[in-house]
Image (cartoon, rainbow, N blue to C red):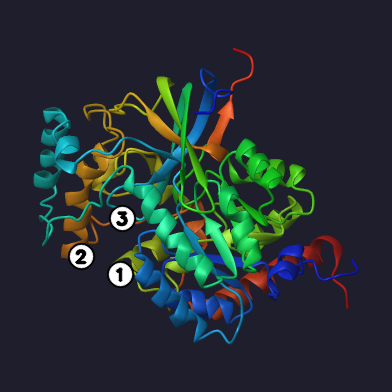
Amino acid sequence: MDPERAGRRAECDGGGLIMGSHYAARQDFTGTLTGEYYDEGDPPWRWYKMIELTRKPNDYPFESVWCEAESLFLIENE
Amino acid sequence: MTQDPLHTKLCDQLGVEFPIVSFTHCKDVAVAVINSGGFAVLGEAMHTPEEIEADIKWIRERIDGKPFGIDLVLPASAPAESSLDEISSKIPESHREFEQMIMEKYDVPMPKESVDLHQWGGLSQALGRAQLEVLLEERVPVIASGLGSPAFLLDAAHERGSLVWGLVGRTRQAKRQLEAGVDAIIAQGFDAAGHTGDMGTLSIVAEVSAIAGDTPIIAAGGITTGRHLAAALCLGASGVWTGTLWLACRESDIDMIIKERLVAATAADTVWSDSISGFTMRVLKCPWTEEWKKPEAPRPLTSPYQMILSSDYIQGANDARRADLMTEASGQGVGFVTEMLPARQIVSDMVEEALGVFDDLVGLPD
């Protein structure tokens, strides 16, 4: 847990590979960080969990998303 | 003018003659561009770690120690894992019916084999990680990230002598990556092939260049001529990232039918459509993209549903090699791709034209 990020609103310039293609595309999210994170591998590649999504791609089927740390932008004035 | 306008800090960073970067999925194109004085980045996002290792070896055997790059797609977000069957079951019947209407109207054959849709979800991080391990182990001269931020791997890459480049579509992404210390930023505009942000190339290159300090900026999106190269340098870039330019070149391994379509196409023959993947991407117009634009068409779904819908059309068209159905990602600069030239000549033509522009504007050194 990262208590300093828990409850913070943030935007994620997300995205990744598109299934069935060699294309990549952006997916934008806005939501609330839970503070949960995990590090993938070494050097650590940090991912934060975002919930209460107020912006997400149309038809996005999930209630949460993992966001790469450097692709997160905290919203300062909310 | 007292110096060669095409000798930029990107040339110094790479030790190459010309600030022209080819982004390609074809090894032969990469080798040809590198051996012509330019630089090439091979797109390997869909390859296994073993395939990437083999490709790196293949390239190294043909470029006599010159530098090259490998591009991966580092994910920036990841949903919970979900099975393909579960995802497919959520596609509305209205969309299935519209897909079937297009398939029947244009007599699109079904794919010869079922389309292999790689699993969607959390696996993307693990795959990206395994691919990166190969690049670090092989000490690839340039590691390029085509989407997510590569900041986390900077120290590991630099310790091995590798440079790290990041591709951005928004200025704030560039600012974040510059602060982290990436070695170059590829600023990609709306004119580009495939999935792009919504900022035009002119705007994003100028904005990112303004905050880049000494870090080279590489302009991307719609760049296919020496005039584009000269313009990009005038905007503050230190080089250009070119993709569509190489699709129809002689060394390119894409289908000859697509090459012929590219050579005949202009910017107006491209479309920014979300009908293929669910994300807006620039491709050559085809019946699939045009049908989804009609008023009676349902709104395209998001990824991955729309890709599931379009995959039979795309693969069926490719399998049957139907020129009237096939499509390919293409940037708006495609109108200047008018011949299937050798890569060496493309590099040479681009350089000569850019120098001509500078000569006309301010004169060239003797």
- The answer for how far apart the CA atoms under marks 3 and 2 are is 11 Å
- The answer for how far apart the CA atoms under marks 2 and 1 are is 8 Å
Q: Residues within 10 Å of mark 3 (few under 14, many from 20)?
A: many
Please report whichever mark, 3 or 2, sits nearer to the chain's N-terminal start. 2
Q: Determine contact: label 2, label 1, CB under 8 Å.
A: yes
Q: Residue at x 41, y 70 (%)?
A: B52
Q: Is mark 1 on a helix, strand or loop?
A: loop
Please report whichever mark, 1 or 3, sits nearer to the chain's N-terminal start. 1
Q: Residues within 10 Å of mark 1 (few under 14, many from 20)?
A: few
Please report whichever mark, 2 or 1, sits nearer to the chain's N-terminal start. 1
Q: Residues within 10 Å of mark 2 (few under 14, many from 20)?
A: some
Checking the image for residue B255, the label placed there is 1
Where does the image place residue A31, in percent across and percent down from the top left?
46, 21
Q: Most extreme residue toward the right, as rendered?
A: B2
Which amino acid type corresponds to the residue marked 1 in the rendered image? Asp
Checking the image for residue B327, the label placed there is 3
**Nearer to me, B350 or B207:** B207
Where does the image place residue B283, in percent across and percent down from the top left?
38, 50
